[in-house]
Amino acid sequence: MHIHILGICGTFMGGLAALAREAGHRVTGCDAGVYPPMSDQLRALGIDLIEGYGADQLALRPDVFVIGNVVSRARGPDGAPKFPLMEAILDAGARYTSGPQWLGEQVLHSRHVLAVAGTHGKTTTTAMLAWILEHAGLAPGFLVGGVPLNFGVSARLGRLPTDGTRAPFVIEADEYDTAFFDKRSKFVHYRPRTAVLNNLEFDHADIFDDLAAIERQFHHLLRTVPPSGRVIANGLEESIARVLHMGLYSELRTFGAADSDYTAEGDPQDFAVLRRGEAVARVRWSLSGTHNQLNALAALAAAEHLGVAPDVAAEALAGFAHVRRRLEVRGTVALPGGAVTVYDDFAHHPTAIRTTIDGLRRRLDREGRRDERILAIFEPRSNTMKLGTMKAQLPWALESAALAFCHAGGLDWDAAAALAPLGERAQVAPDIDTLVAQVAAAVRPGDHLLCMSNGAFGGVHGRLLAALRPQ
């Protein structure tokens, strides 16, 4: 079929486009504000991209329009629709569906779906699990909300069902809503046989009133897991315990807590994996941080549901190369007295910001580089952060950084006031040029510049590198 995707450059919709193209469909799409890595991936696949949401795209006459959740019925101050193509689709009575529903019906219905849900770590854990299954020879399909470096693409179909068995498909299971016409979480469309509940705290304040509302959506996911399925749950999370208490209909395995089925013993970079107290594997790898240790336990437990032994999973994790935009080094600048390193990271929720900074700090300390500073450079870009719902948590999130620099352009709340508890350690900039100038003036040899955003961040990484290089 020919599908035309509205909002094609989002991480999920771009992955869906790649899967559809691989399956032999003709794929076109449109979006606004296109930026890498997804735009590069789509062009490499030969998918035609159209800038904007003009109603003239109705003339493409696809078999179905696939609608991303960026699309709405919103209108501008002048009354003109923000997405005229959507208005034209509705007027014409053209066939349309959501991305998650199309994926569930066209790709996932015949697969053993392994869905990774959670407020944090979904992308990393999904990539880990896909790599474990690949290393074990299972050739999984996957859709990840980023680009796993082990694979180089965010999605693929993998081995297809040929003998009546359900070939594995690993998917990042997002709790954000499906589309403007379907306010259920995306993951209710996936019907997993293995469901990972990695962690759960409040987020997405633009669509959820409170944590209890998100917990209900997570329980909707559990209701779709068959009795022969398995739920992998973080034993450290009270919120997940509440979800399980609402009703569990499948086999349960837990990880993380002292009394869990799967626990870790040792440093996050070199630790034993215990299954009900018995050592079954050892993970030695390049990733740092307790959060990645927990991600590894979750992935290992999920893979075991498909028969992958823990020691085989640990072998795979030793070669896990992480995901783009997760502490990704974008460049270094040699200065007299020491090099300055610039990183890119997707962190945007306060907990993720703190975890990312702490993970880098721990790694530097372990390497004997305790005197090297971390400068946190971030923008509150997610819908939740733009609303200011979690602004009070920012000083806590940033306390391990030597200095913090906030891009406050477009915010309706006072970032300087929110960061006041950090005193002179925090600076606020109204635009990227000012932000770069502030950072460049503060840099010392040996510093680590950690840029955190869930968007392109105005190309700040390259601009910082350019500003620091000797002229």
Image (tube, rainbow, N blue to C red):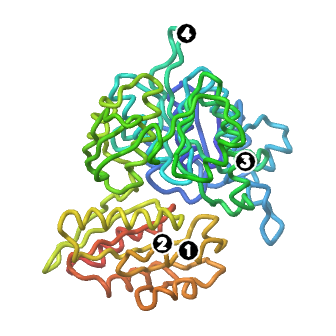
- Secondary structure of the residue carrying tag 4 is loop
Find disc 4 in the rendering and name its residue: 164
Q: Residue furthest left?
A: 336
Q: Residue at x 47, y 43 (%)?
A: 259
**Does the CB distance between marks 2 and 3 fall below 8 Å?**
no
Which residue is label 1 attached to?
A: 393
Of the pair 119 and 69, the residue shown nearer to us: 119
Give the residue drawn at x 27%, y 39%. 282
What residue type is disc 4 on?
Gly
In this picture, is 140 found above or below 70? Answer: above
Mark 4 or 3, nearer chain start? 4
Q: Nearer the viewer, mark 2 or mark 4?
A: 2
Disc 1 to disc 4, C-alpha distance: 50 Å
- Residue hosting label 2: 397
Marks 2/4: CA–CA distance:
49 Å
Q: What residue do we see at 67% from left, 27% from top? A: 105
User: Mark 1 or 4 closer to N-term?
Assistant: 4
Q: Are marks 1 and 4 in contact (CB under 8 Å)?
A: no
Task: Give the residue type at disc 2.
Answer: Ala
Find numbered disc 3 in the image and state the secondary structure of the residue it sits on.
Answer: helix
Query: What kind of residue is marked 1?
Result: Gln
> Does residue 461 appear to the left or right of 243 in the view shown?
left
- Cα–Cα span, label 3 and label 1: 24 Å
* Residue linked to disc 3: 216
Name the residue: 56% across, 60% down.
33
Residue type at tag 3: Arg
Query: In the image, residue 268 lies at what x, y percent?
Result: 31, 52
Q: Where the N terminus falls, by quadrant?
A: top right
Which residue is nearer to you in this view: 85 or 239? 239
